[in-house]
Image (cartoon, rainbow, N blue to C red):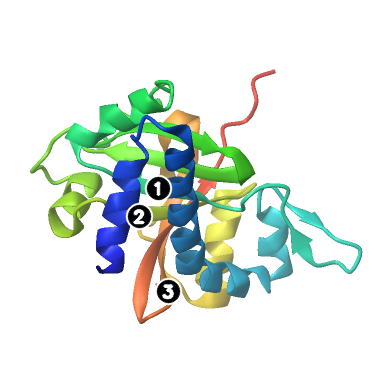
């Protein structure tokens, strides 16, 4: 069985009625996502300014970065017919407020041990939106890795100027739930590429 087959099986496992089986599936997906993004995150962390933009961020006594939770969120694209069963099995989390010009339905899924996911699907199967195109090309899978930063404009500029990486969009754009985002294709193990979404959270309301 290929890793792609395993990932599909684990994604379906997120809808299992048994909480222990859902957690086991989530743990496996988190491990794959960590492998995909770790090389990029480790390299970018060498830049002190970028490292200090990461949220949540802390440093140990030796000055090495550490995180009070997983430093990324795994974005998983699922077929429309699997979206609601996964949502229902996990207590029907509320849908994210996605800008109307973006082809996505989305909700957050959180497990213990800080395995964090955004479950995404297309509003228009067969359409030209990013999630629809991903599903048409690859089927269900890890569509992106989301990294939270304090200032997405500055983080984008650091990756552009210090790491010679071109962002997907020429300017920061609106994301779900009032966030500001941009995207990069980064190198991953096995000569693969992984889509990294830099996310600046919506400021807390006063």
Q: Is residue 169 something one can see in this rendering?
A: yes
Name the residue nearer the viewer: 18 or 167: 18
Alpha-carbon span between mark 2 and mark 3? 13 Å
- The percent position of residue 77, horizontal first and vertical second, equals 29, 46
For marks 3 and 1 on the same chain, the one whose residue lies earlier in the sequence:
1
Drawn side of residue 80 relative to residue 52, left or right: left
Q: SS of the residue at dot 3?
A: strand
Query: What is the residue that sits farthest to the bottom in this orientation?
Result: 191
Say the numbered circle drawn on residue 162. Answer: none
Question: Dot 1 surroundings within 10 Å: few (below 14), some, or many (20 or more)?
Answer: many
Drawn side of residue 91 relative to residue 152, left or right: left
Residue bearing the label numbered 2: 142
Q: Going 55% across and 63% down the picture, which residue do you hit?
A: 157
For marks 1 and 2 on the same chain, the one whose residue lies earlier in the sequence:
1
Q: Going 41% across and 43% down the picture, which residue do you hit?
A: 173
Residue bearing the label numbered 1: 75
Position of the C terminus, as image quadrant, is: top right
- The percent position of residue 38, horizontal first and vertical second, equals 54, 68
Name the residue nearer the viewer: 41 or 140: 140
Q: Is residue 98 something one can see in this rendering?
A: no
Q: Going 32% across and 39% down the picture, which residue do you hit?
A: 120
Residue bearing the label numbered 3: 188
Q: Is residue 12 above or below residue 45?
A: above
Q: SS of the residue at dot 1?
A: strand
């Amino acid at each position: 069985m290929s890793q792609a087959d395993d990932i599909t099986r684990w994604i379906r496992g997120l809808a299992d009625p048994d909480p222990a089986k859902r957690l086991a599936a989530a743990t496996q997906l988190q491990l794959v996502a960590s492998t995909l993004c770790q090389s990029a995150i480790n390299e970018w962390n060498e830049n002190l300014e970028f490292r200090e933009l990461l949220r949540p961020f802390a440093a140990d006594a030796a000055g090495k970065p550490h995180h009070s939770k997983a430093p990324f969120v795994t974005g998983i694209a699922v077929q429309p017919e699997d979206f609601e069963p996964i949502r229902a099995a996990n207590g029907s989390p509320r849908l994210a407020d996605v800008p109307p010009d973006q082809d996505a339905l989305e909700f957050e899924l959180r497990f213990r041990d800080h395995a964090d996911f955004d479950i995404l699907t297309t509003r228009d199967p067969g359409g030209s939106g990013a999630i629809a195109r991903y599903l048409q090309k690859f089927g269900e899978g890890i569509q992106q890795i989301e990294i939270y930063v304090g200032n997405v404009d500055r983080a984008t500029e650091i990756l552009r100027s210090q790491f010679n990486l071109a962002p997907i969009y020429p300017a920061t754009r609106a994301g779900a739930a009032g966030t500001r985002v941009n995207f990069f294709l980064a190198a991953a193990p096995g000569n693969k590429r992984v889509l990294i979404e830099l996310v600046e959270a919506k400021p807390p309301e006063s």
